[in-house]
Image (tube, helix red, strand yellow):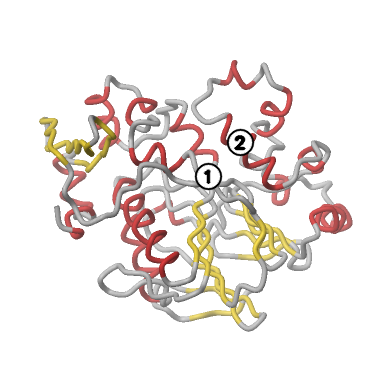
Amino acid sequence: MLVSSLFANSALAQTLYSDGPYLFYKNNKIEQIDILENTKKVSVYSGPLAINQTFSANEIDSFQNVEKIAAISDIHGQFDIFKTLLQNNGIIDQQLNWSYGKGHLVITGDIFDRGDTVTEALWLVFKLEQQAAAAGGKLHYLLGNHEYMVLRDDQRYLHPKYVHAVSHFNNDLRQQYSEQSVLGRWLRSKSTIIKINGFVFLHGGIHQEFLDLNLSLEQANNEFRETIGLSKNALKENPTWLSLHSSNGPIWYRGYFRDENLEEAQISSILKQLNATKVIVGHTSMPTIETHFKSKVIAIDSSIKRGEKGELLLWHNATFTRGMMSGEQKPLQ
């Protein structure tokens, strides 16, 4: 299969409800499953992407001396907007290959749900992660609440295309993204919270309740990985897991934007405990990328999910800017 076929035209996919490929480890081969309209096609994968048997989690989730950073959030199945932002802001080239050198690209969760080109976005990120590493850079795909929802078979926000696709997997997303699937195994290696150059990146936000758990970033990310695929009832059996997945937990918290009693001093305290200068989050939709609490919090969910436009946060030479769809860079305010 050619790389271009991995990133199919979204309008065609929506009309015909074709999807794939889904790859599975089976009998020392990679089995490929494609959904072609109403037909499930099974073959042996022989495509262009390098498929590892295992995917390693970060040993350390803090990174220093990174020269340039790009960050985006809540893509929600809007592949065309995602691709355009990356291309026009110098992250990838016109052939969808990494062109950001030693820079770090951070995706703070929620590639899944709502839109009709989730699979295309996942495989692009899968490829770019390998290319970034080869170039001395790094792609960080952090898990958001919708990743955890899909991995426990929560189908409430699936586009009809993916309702159709999961019907070919016994109507169970846990099978579709199991540990025997390439994407499922890959997702299980991901972190949820990282720190780069003193900036903390995650999906929802850091509440004091999380800090009171007294976990390092690495410990927190390992605990999160342990919860992948677990039901809500199973989470309740472990106090740490329940806290991580609560409304004040890192993947759900919206207090930076909705808690009228939250004060800058509390944000400063949180940052001091994290040994950080800023928290950069998605999850709560904004019309543009914007700052809060005297720039201590940066909100990067620019409402890509609406399928109209989006923005990319850029950091270089100690300066943040907003990367637009056109490639123009505007000041961060």
Question: Which circle's residue, 2 or 1, is located before the other in the chain?
Answer: 1
Residue 196, percent from left and from top = 65, 64
Residue 235, percent from left and from top = 62, 22
Q: Amino acid at mark 1?
A: Leu
Q: Quadrant of residue 292?
A: bottom right
Q: Is residue 289 left or right of residue 87?
A: right
Residue 294, percent from left and from top = 78, 67
Q: Amino acid at mark 2?
A: Phe
In the rendering, which numbered label is found on residue 143? 1
Q: Residue at x 69, y 38 (%)?
A: 249
Q: Quadrant of residue 274?
A: bottom right
- Secondary structure under the numbered disc 1 in the rendered image: loop
Q: Quadrant of the C terminus?
A: bottom right
In the rendering, which numbered label is found on residue 224? 2
Give yes or no for contact between labels 2 and 1 (Cβ–Cβ under 8 Å): yes
Image depth: mark 2 or mark 1 in front: 2
Please, is residue 89 above or below residue 267 in the view? below
Please, is residue 248 above or below residue 288 in the view? above
